[in-house]
Image: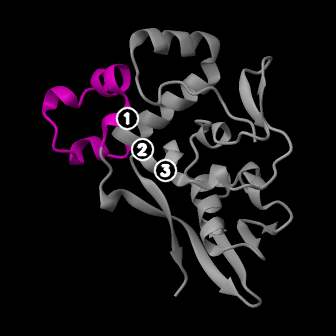
Amino acid sequence: MDSSYCIVCYTSDARRQAYSAQHFPEVCGRYYRQIESMLFDSGLIDKGSLDAKHRSREEKLCRHGFVHWCRLKAQEIVGAVKRRLSQDVLAYRIRDPAWIATKHLMPVRGRWLQRGNEIRFWNVEEQVADSVIKRMINCLDCGFCVVECFSGRRFDRITKSLQIDGCIQCGRCLRLKFCMGWQHRFWRRVIVEEP
């Protein structure tokens, strides 16, 4: 459950951007490409009720970043479809296979199975399964869930990343109120139940 260095989740001043661009260029580039896509390519910038001076790339990418945006209900998109199978098995069909990162399934180790873009859980509470899937499909690699782990987290000085060794499945990391991807993303990828 390794995590990238958290670049500019809260603030986005020039000093922090220069540091992240110098020390973590790949992660920094990926981060800002994501923000460009979310704001400008998606047309979201035109739907906001902001003055023109607050709509520029400099304002949103260099000065404030995306954390100051408020998500609208209409910005939620379907990320996974949930089905209930026999014997209390829950199946989640993930819309985009690129969103699947099995490191997020560590808290339910031994009680899940992946078949293509579908993940099945057995002997797992529905709330826990939902939290694992929500966190996985919205992940920004900010590392908040790893920071929540006190028993197994380890800082790798070579890669400058937090990693989990020996997960005891305590469930502390499943609290979504600390998840940056779930709380602060422009859109939110949600789970819907199959009719």
Residue designated by label 1: 66
| Observer-nearest of 178 and 39 | 178
In screen coordinates, is 11 left or right of 175? left
Residue at x 53%, y 24% (from the top left corner): 7
Q: Look at the picture and state if 159 lies above or below 134.
A: above
Residue at x 44%, y 62% (from the top left corner): 77
The quadrant of the picture occupied by the N terminus is top right
Mark 3 or mark 2: whose residue is earlier in sequence: 3
Contact check, label 3 and label 2, Cβ < 8 Å: no
Task: Count neighbours of disc 1 (C-alpha within 10 A) and say few if under 14, some if 14 to 19, many if 20 or more.
Answer: many
Amino acid type, callout 2: His
Q: Which circle marks residue 184 in the picture?
A: 2
Gap in angstroms between the C-alphas marked 1 and 2: 8 Å
Gap in angstroms between the C-alphas marked 3 and 2: 10 Å
Q: Which circle marks residue 144 in the picture?
A: none
Residue at x 57%, y 53% (from the top left corner): 175
Amino acid type, callout 1: Phe
Q: Which residues are magenta?
A: 41-69
Amino acid type, callout 3: Lys
Contact check, label 1 and label 3, Cβ < 8 Å: no
Residue 189 in the image: x percent, y percent? 49, 58
Mark 1 or mark 3: whose residue is earlier in sequence: 1
Q: Which circle marks residue 177 in the picture?
A: 3
Q: Look at the picture and state if 94 lies above or below 140.
A: below
